[in-house]
């Protein structure tokens, strides 16, 4: 007999309105069992489905299956991952690195699986999920046919689940650098030490878009290992790739060399200072990209984050040449789409320039967003054009 959790009416409503998380305060009767999978019922003992159970987390339950007649076993995980992979069909014609499982948006709460060529980098981010580690690894090997799997389980979220933070190889061998091809641009991902699972796969299509409109003198602020800059280089005469991290820029240089690109200058600087200084000099750029780290890490920091976003965007708008384009993004989950656009309107109003919104952008196909699960969406982007 599986252990059972009983949820409150509030918890039930949340599940019925399409969100798989049940918080600690919405569990009326907690299962007397270790982390794993448990059956969930409402207060009248009506079965609601299976959920992953995390005894130590604030998010106690994560629903994974409505039908309690279906066992959560190796076959179940295989089918889930097969289905997720089938939602990415076509992506492998433009890249060899993409997300196979985007957690809740693929019905696999707290699981991330990214493909990097013949290897997978995964993140198991709840205690309940961790108990299915072997089944998940087997399913990925079987379905995605990878030679090795690395777990980047070094994320802070794991501590909240009472799980160790570690980076471990779970299957085969995984190289420290993997060559990624993204619309013909190549770069090295660093699965063991790079940001996220080794690279920012979530901006792939936006990098391709920015590359397509790139011209003249281009500036890629917050460049990391050069990802946008490499795309801008084809259409632009010159590109400045700017980042505050010397280490990131070192890798950006290697990536440029790997592509035979020689029109990128690498500048180690604080983007806020650089943009201000260039504005003071009356400089002009024909193409600008702003892809900063998340300024709003929590809800309470939204006001300060908005000031930061507005500052860099207003200055970038002022730096645009006539007809120049700015691709700007925010990856702060706490900053809504509406607030992002409002911020851009305010920045445009204060920039003294007339700015057109040419395209609103979001997440790529391999990072699907579920409308009733806000946590699955975090990237907002806009392609802007200076009209005068
Ligand atoms: N555009 C990149 C991802 C950027 S991640 C891509 O598509 O892959 C954010 C980057 O901003 C990091 O490399 C970090 O080193 C850099 N960064 C953070 N604060 C900065 C600042 N104030 N000025 C310049 N770079 C900064």
Image (cartoon, grey):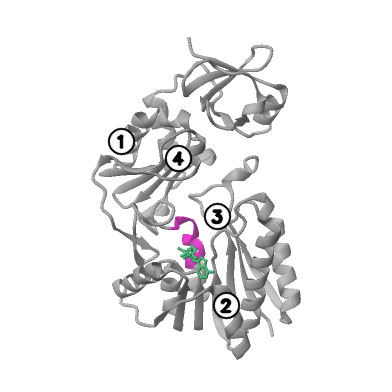
Q: Within 8 Å: ligand 1 and the Cβ of disc 1? A: no
> Disc 4 designates what residue?
84
Q: Within 8 Å: ligand 1 and the Cβ of disc 2? A: yes
- x and y percentages locating residue 168 in the rendered image: 32, 42
> Disc 2 designates what residue?
273
Secondary structure under tag 3 reads loop
For residue 363, the mark is 3
Q: Earlier in the sequence, mark 3 or mark 1?
A: 1
Q: Earlier in the sequence, mark 2 or mark 4?
A: 4
Instruction: State which region is magenta.
Output: 200-208
Q: Residues within 10 Å of mark 2 (few under 14, many from 20)?
A: few
In the rendered structure, are the residues bearing label 2 and label 3 in contact, judged by CB atoms less than 8 Å apart?
no
Q: In this rendered view, identify the residue nearer to me: 180 or 184.
A: 180
For residue 235: magenta? no
Q: Earlier in the sequence, mark 4 or mark 3?
A: 4
Vertical placement of 99 versus 141: above or below? below
Q: Earlier in the sequence, mark 2 or mark 3?
A: 2
Q: Is residue 323 visible?
A: no
Q: Nearer the viewer, mark 2 or mark 4?
A: 2
Q: CA distance from mark 2 to mark 3?
A: 29 Å
> Disc 1 designates what residue?
142
Q: Magenta region, mostly helix, strand or loop? A: helix
């Amino acid at each position: 007999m599986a252990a059972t959790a009983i949820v409150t009416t509030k918890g039930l409503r949340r599940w019925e309105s399409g969100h798989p998380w049940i918080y600690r305060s919405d569990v009326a009767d907690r299962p007397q069992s270790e982390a794993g999978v448990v059956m969930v019922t409402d207060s009248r003992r009506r079965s609601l489905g299976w959920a992953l159970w995390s005894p130590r987390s604030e998010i106690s339950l994560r629903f994974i299956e409505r039908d309690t007649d279906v066992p959560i076993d190796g076959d179940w995980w295989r089918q889930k991952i097969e289905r997720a992979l089938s939602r990415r069909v076509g992506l492998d014609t433009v890249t060899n690195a993409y997300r196979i499982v985007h957690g809740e948006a693929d019905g696999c709460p707290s699981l991330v699986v990214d493909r990097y060529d013949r290897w997978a980098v995964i993140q198991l981010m709840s205690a309940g999920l961790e108990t299915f580690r072997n089944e998940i690894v087997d399913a990925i090997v079987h379905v995605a046919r990878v030679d090795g799997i690395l777990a980047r389980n070094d994320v802070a979220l794991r501590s909240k689940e009472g799980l160790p933070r570690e980076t471990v190889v779970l299957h085969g061998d995984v190289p420290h650098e993997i060559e990624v091809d993204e619309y013909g641009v190549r770069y090295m991902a660093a699965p063991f030490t790079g940001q996220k699972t080794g690279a920012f796969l979530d901006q792939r299509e936006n990098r391709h878009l920015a590359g397509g409109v790139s011209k003249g003198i281009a500036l890629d602020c917050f460049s990391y290992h050069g990802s946008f800059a490499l795309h801008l280089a084809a259409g632009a005469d010159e590109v400045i790739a700017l980042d505050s991290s010397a280490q990131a820029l070192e890798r950006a240089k290697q990536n440029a060399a790997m592509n035979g690109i020689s029109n990128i200058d690498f500048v180690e600087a604080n983007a806020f200072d650089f943009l201000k200084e260039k504005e003071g000099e009356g400089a002009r750029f024909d193409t600008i990209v702003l892809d900063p780290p998340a300024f709003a890490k929590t809800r309470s920091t939204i006001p300060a984050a908005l000031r930061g976003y507005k500052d860099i965007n207003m200055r970038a708008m002022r730096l645009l040449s006539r007809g120049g384009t700015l691709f700007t993004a925010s990856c702060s989950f706490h900053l809504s789409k509406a607030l992002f656009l409002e911020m851009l309107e305010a920045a445009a109003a204060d920039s003294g320039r007339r700015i057109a919104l040419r395209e609103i952008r979001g997440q790529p196909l391999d990072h699907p967003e579920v409308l009733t699960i806000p946590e699955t969406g975090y990237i907002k982007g806009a392609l802007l054009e200076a009209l005068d």
